[in-house]
Image (cartoon, rainbow, N blue to C red):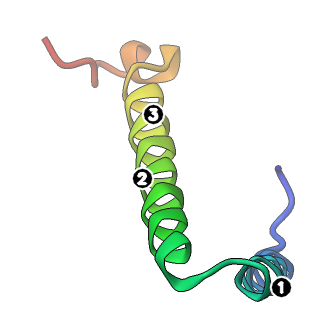
Amino acid sequence: MNNCFGEKLTALSAAIAIQISQYTNDEDLVVLGALFTTIGDQLSLLAAVNASCSPDNKKNGNEKQ
């Protein structure tokens, strides 16, 4: 995803959330919200770790021991 589509992704996520909420009860929505939050947190963590371990960081002397 090299292109910046912030507004489109925001609109898409809102549309998906509205669609899911129309067919899901409140108790399940709470669980799905927590699940998607956890998935997002894990993706962010993996991206941060991958960035800190990239070959470019090691070449620049930014590798942590």
Indicate which disc, 3 or 2, sits on the residue closer to the N terminus: 2
Residue in view at x 47 percent, y 76 percent: 27
Q: Quadrant of residue 60?
A: top left
**For the residues marked 3 and 2, what is the alpha-carbon distance in whole angstroms?**
12 Å
Q: Quadrant of residue 21?
A: bottom right
The residue pinned by badge 1 equals 15
Number of the label disc, if any, that sits on residue 38: 2
* Structural distance between the alpha carbons of marks 1 and 3: 26 Å
Quadrant for the C terminus, please.
top left
Q: Which of labels 3 and 2 is toward the front?
A: 2
What amino acid type should be assigned to the residue bearing mark 3? Leu
Q: Which amino acid does label 2 sit on?
A: Thr
Q: Is residue 55 left or right of residue 63?
A: right
Which residue appears at 84% of the width and 73% of the height?
A: 5
User: Mark 1 and 2 residues: CB-CB less than 8 Å, in contact?
Assistant: no
- Work out whether residue 4 or residue 38 is closer to the camera in this orientation and state it: 38
Front: mark 1 or 3: 1
Kindly identify which residue carries mark 3.
46
- Residue 54's place in the image compared with 32, above or below, is above
